Structure formats: structure tokens, C-alpha cells
Amino acid sequence: MEKIIAAVAIAGALTFVGAGAAQAERYPSAPVQGTVSDGTVAPGETVVFSSNEGLFIPGEIIDITVDFVAGEPAASGTAGGAGRAGAALGGPILPMAIVLTDTVTADAEGNFSWSFTPQEEGTYTLTATGRESGATVTATVAVDAPEAPVGGGTTGSTSGTTGGGLANTGIDSAMLLWGAAGIGALGLGAGSIFVARRRAGAEA
């Protein structure tokens, strides 16, 4: 009888350990860092979110969620190789909202690839979760509008400014006007002298 009870206890313990291991394998304890085609993009640029670790069951449905924090994104850096992005911590805590949900099917190797095009400036957190495996993959993308160029010259303007140089068209025009006025004054003076001489000759 004691042997039967011991055998039952051992079998129950093995069953419990096996179930615990299966549960741990089915629901990973922490998300895995995914891959994005570019960690920092401008509004309107397409981003590809993917995982090549074989974490999902082939053919299973993967739920995609996109969380968004508006505003100028914090400084971001890459981690874990090319295409991996990590957001820097610090600054005020801003509210995060889910702005997009979608689904994708895992391929024969248990991987996926999904693309989207963010339109607003801010920080996007991408999460992929397998419905059967429970595997979770996440990545972060910073969307930052390019700054307008500062300085530099303009071409084709009426002031003649090119390449950041000083305009000289206005100075040349002033000089021409003063020159023309001087020539006109000299002409009037010469004409007055000529007329005066003719009058003096006629009276003599």
C-alpha cells in the first residue's frame, strides 16, 4: 500500500513539473526584442516590424498592436545590432494610447514581418503576440520630422543674393543713377555756357 501511495505521489509530481514546464514554454516570461527596418524615421515613411527568432508556432495568428506617445520623441539609440531600436528613458511621462491593431500569420519557420506607415511625430511601440504560443515581440520607433535648413543663400531673387554672399545690385544701380545725374548736370552746364557765349557775340 505504501509503495502504491509513493508511486502515485511521484507520478503526480512529475505531471505537475511537466505541466509547469509546458506552461512556461507556452507563455514566455518576458517580451523579446524585435527588429525594425529603421529606428528613427520621418512622418510618412514605411517601417517594417519583424522577428526572425522562430518564436511563434508556424501558421498561428499573431496580434499586432501599436502604442503611440505624441510629441517630439526622446533621444533614441540602437541596441542589439542594426535595425534594433531602444528608446531612452527620462523626461515627462506622457500618456500612451493604442492607435492601431492588426493581425499577421507566422510563416513556416515561426517568424513574421509586418509593415506600417506612421504619420504623426512621436514614439511608437510595436508589439506582436502569438495567440497559441503566447510569444511576445516588441520594438520601438521614433518618428521625427526633419528640421528646416538654417542659413544659406537664395537664388533668383531681385536683390541678386546668391550662395550667402552680399548683394551688390543695389549699390551698382545707385552709382549709375549718380553718374547719370552728374553727366546730366555737366551737359546742362555746358549748354548754358554755349548759350551765354552766343548771346554775348550777338550783342557785340
Image (spheres, rainbow, N blue to C red):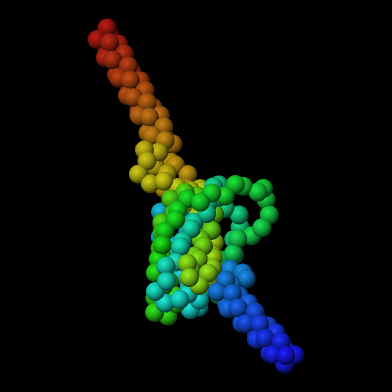
Q: Position of residue 8 (x, y in %)?
A: 67, 86
Q: Tell me where residue 24 sits by quadrant.
A: bottom right
Q: Tell me where residue 74 sits by quadrant.
A: bottom right
Residue 197 visible in rendering:
no
- Please tell me whether residue 120 is drawn above or below residue 186 in the rendered image: below
Judge by depth and name the residue closer to the eye, 173 or 39. Answer: 39
- Please tell me whether residue 133 is drawn above or below residue 67 in the rendered image: below
Q: Residue furthest right?
A: 2
Judge by depth and name the residue closer to the eye, 132 or 68. Answer: 132
Residue at screen point 62% across, 82% down = 15
Q: Quadrant of the N terminus?
A: bottom right
Residue at screen point 51% across, 62% down = 127
Q: Position of residue 178 (x, y in %)?
A: 40, 29
Residue 1 visible in rendering:
yes
Q: Position of residue 50 (x, y in %)?
A: 46, 70
Q: Quadrant of the C terminus?
A: top left
